[in-house]
Amino acid sequence: MRRAIFCTAALMGLLAGAGPAMAQPLLLGGTALAPQNSYSYLGAILPFAGARLGSGWYGTIFANYLTYHYVTTQNKTPVTVGVTAPGIQGGVGYAWQGAAYQLALSGALGYQYFLSHPDFAAGGPLGSTVTFMPQIQARYNFTSTLYASTIASYSFGQRAYWSRFQGGYQPVHWLSFGPEGILQGGVDYRIRQVGAFASIALGDGWNVVGEGGATYTRGLPSTGYASFSFARTL
C-alpha cells in the first residue's frame, strides 16, 4: 500500500526564507503535487507576546487537504483505492537564533478525516484520526552565501515520519537555491525524493518557493514531484 504523510514539516520550512527576524504573524500556503497524491494547506504562524518570528514562543494553526492512491488486494484481486483527507491542526513551538544558526522545536495536535473510494482500506487510516506531531528544524550558515537546513517530524497517530535536507546557495538577499533530499515512510510505505528548490523574496513581505524532482517509492515506478508555496508577513 502507498500512503502519504500528514505533517507540518514542509510548512515550517518557509520560515528561513521568509525572514526569521520578523515580528509580525506569518501567513503560509501551498500545494504539493505528484501523479498519485497531492497536499494543500493554508495557515499562520503567530509569535507570542514578547517574541519575534525565529526567536521565542510561537503558535501555529493550519487547515489542509490531502489526496492519495494506493494499490492493494481484495479477494485476491488488485484494487486501486483513492483517499481524500481534510484536516486541521494547531501547535506551539519555541525557536532559538544565533549568529550562524536557527533552531526550532514544536509540537502540534491534528485532526484528519480519511475517506476512501471504494470504501475499503488495508492497514491505513480510515475515518477520524487524531495525532500528535513533534518536530525539529535547524539551519546553519557556513558563510554569508552557503547554508544547510534540515527538518524532521513524526506523526504518532499515523506512525509515519517525514524529513528533509536542503543545501542552499544565496548569491543575493532575495534569492536562494540548491539541492534537496526528502525521506518519508510509515507502516507500509517508504518514499525517497531527490530534487532542487528555489526561494525568492518578492518584496512587501512576500516570499515564494518552488521545488521539484524525482520520487522513488518502494514497490512502485518512479515519478516526478513539484510544489509551490508562499509566505506573507501580515
Image (spheres, rainbow, N blue to C red):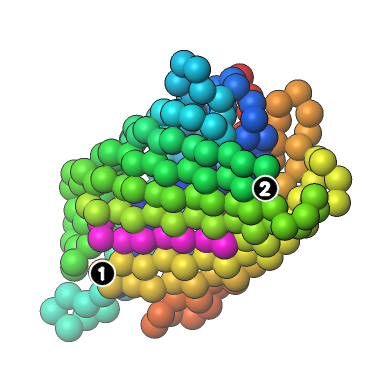
Return the residue nearer the eye: 185 or 223. Answer: 185
Percent coordinates x, y for residue 95 in the rendering: 49, 37
User: Going 34% across and 48% down the picture, which residue do you hit?
Assistant: 134
Return the residue nearer the eye: 106 or 34. Answer: 106
Q: Is residue 73 above or below residue 132?
A: below
Residue 191 appears left or right of 207: left
Q: Give the number of callouts.
A: 2
Percent coordinates x, y for residue 116 in the rendering: 25, 55
User: Going 25% across and 60% down the picture, which residue do you hit?
Assistant: 159
Q: Which residues are magenta?
A: 158-165
Q: Amino acid at mark 2?
A: Ala
Q: Residue furthest top?
A: 49
User: Going 47% across and 68% down the picture, which residue do you hit?
Assistant: 183
Label 2 sits on residue = 100
Asked if residue 18 is among those painted magenta in the image, a careful observer would answer no
Precedes in sequence: disc 1 or disc 2: 2
Q: Report whether residue 160 is seen.
A: yes
Q: Residue furthest left?
A: 75
- Tag shown at residue 187: 1
Q: Amino acid at mark 1?
A: Val
Q: Report whether residue 79 is seen.
A: no
Q: Quadrant of the C terminus?
A: top right
Q: Secondary structure at mark 1?
A: loop
Q: Is residue 221 above or below residue 187?
A: below
Residue 83 appears left or right of 225: left
Q: What whole-number distance in Å separates the C-alpha atoms at marks 1 and 2?
A: 37 Å
Q: Is residue 234 above or below residue 92?
A: above
